[in-house]
Image (cartoon, grey):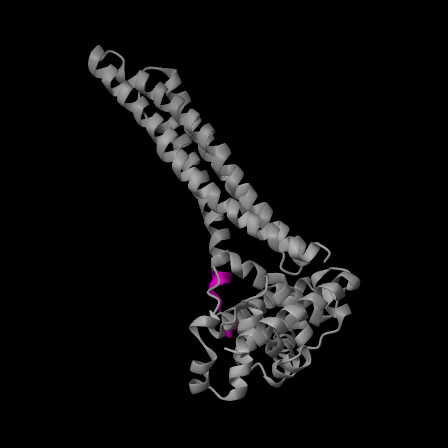
Amino acid sequence: MQDFDALKKIWQEEPGKARQISSPAELSSTSQRNRRWLKNTQLIGAIGQIFTAAFITWMIFYGNFGFKFWYTYLSMSLVVLLCLMQAAFMFYTYGKIKAIDESLSPAEHLRQWEEYYAIRKKQLTFQGPIFTILLSVVIGIYYIEILSGRPFWPSLIIVVVTIAWILFAYFYLGKKSIKKETGRLQSIIDELKQVEEQFSTND
Amino acid sequence: MKQHKEFTDLYEQYAPGILKLCMGYTGDRTQAEDLLQEVFLSVWNNMNKFRQEASWKTWIYRIAVNTCLTYLRKRKLKTVDIDEHPVAQLQEEKSNREQEVQLLYTCISKLPEADRLLISMVLEDQSYEEIAAVVDISVNNLRVKIHRIKKQLTEIYNQYARL
């Protein structure tokens, strides 16, 4: 039967042999790389979206597509808008990850991570419907251009199949994967809250 | 160059204690060593932010506590299951002292996350004021918590030492 002082003696007799290092460059950590990866994914993604938006804008003006209707160009502009919206979301998330500070108190630090996961969750539930609606509008306008003057029945079949696919992708595939991902994020948020409470609640 | 020297001095001084804190948190040497490196990488990356509002020790331990707590989110901790490593088996592999130390680490890793970190700092003989500064809670609240955790850890240890 050991008492706490005996446990303390066991602990203190253990020297805790840490690897010797002569420079910080000798340190490496998978988790640090993960956080950098998380941050860089957002930054590179945002820059990629801006380049895509710039390329589509260039195509609108210099692409010589010769579209019959002006609103086909409008649909291309909507794609540019989508890219810029996505870039803005990604820059915002990047900023949130960058601001996470390990030297804050544990409760505050955990709250920063909680906030980051809450943003990710909000993005998933908020972005989905907006992007689906805007993309559907874009495809709809584009179809007016390419299907105008074509036979009625084949055109109708293409439109019906496309609408069916969008509905299936949004209401079945999208909802399913959003539900799974938001569930995962919520469980992380709950865990963080639980640990935060371990510090903040009085015994 | 001066920063390099300061960093290696800090590493030399605090790495053994932080490693033990990480061992208590994870109960696993490999994960503890990875965590130790992560802690000191954060120390290195944030050294320019150190404002001397707290001591180096408090600041580094705070980073260590935060790193441990979020490490859990990044990879589900594979805590060592005592039942998979009964004392009888350990006896064949390790000396008595090593065996006691490993059992202690494993028992600590059975506590809730915050408690593991608090008790590891107590075992390291840090004052309540220092620990309270690291985790930013009142000394009185900390005292009550530590009292409960000490009792809980002793019970777990004795329970498994009998196996």
Residue drawn at x 61%, y 86% as measured from the top left: A13
What range of the chain is rendered magenta?
A23-33
Task: Please report the residue visible at 47 percent of the width from the left and 46 percent of the height from the top.
Answer: A184
Question: Residue B12, percent across and down?
Answer: 61, 80
Q: Is residue B122 left or right of residue A142?
A: right
- Position of residue B95 relative to residue B116, above or below, is below
Give the x, y percent position of residue A28: 49, 69
| Residue at x-position 52% and y-position 44% | A186
Do we see residue B66 in this rendering?
A: no
Residue A83, x across and y down, in percent: 45, 34
Residue furthest to the bottom in view is B95
Closer-to-camera residue (A80/B32)? B32
Name the image quarter holding residue A76.
top left
Closer-to-camera residue (A172/A135): A172
Q: Position of residue A90 (x, y in %)?
A: 50, 42
Is residue A178 in view from this perspective? yes
Relative to A167, is B21 above or below? below
Nearer to me, A86 or A72: A86
- Is A49 left, or right, of A20 in this rendering? left
Question: In the depicted view, which residue is nearer to us: B18 or B119?
Answer: B119
Residue A29 appears left or right of A115 = left
In terms of secondary structure, what is the magenta stretch mainly?
Answer: helix
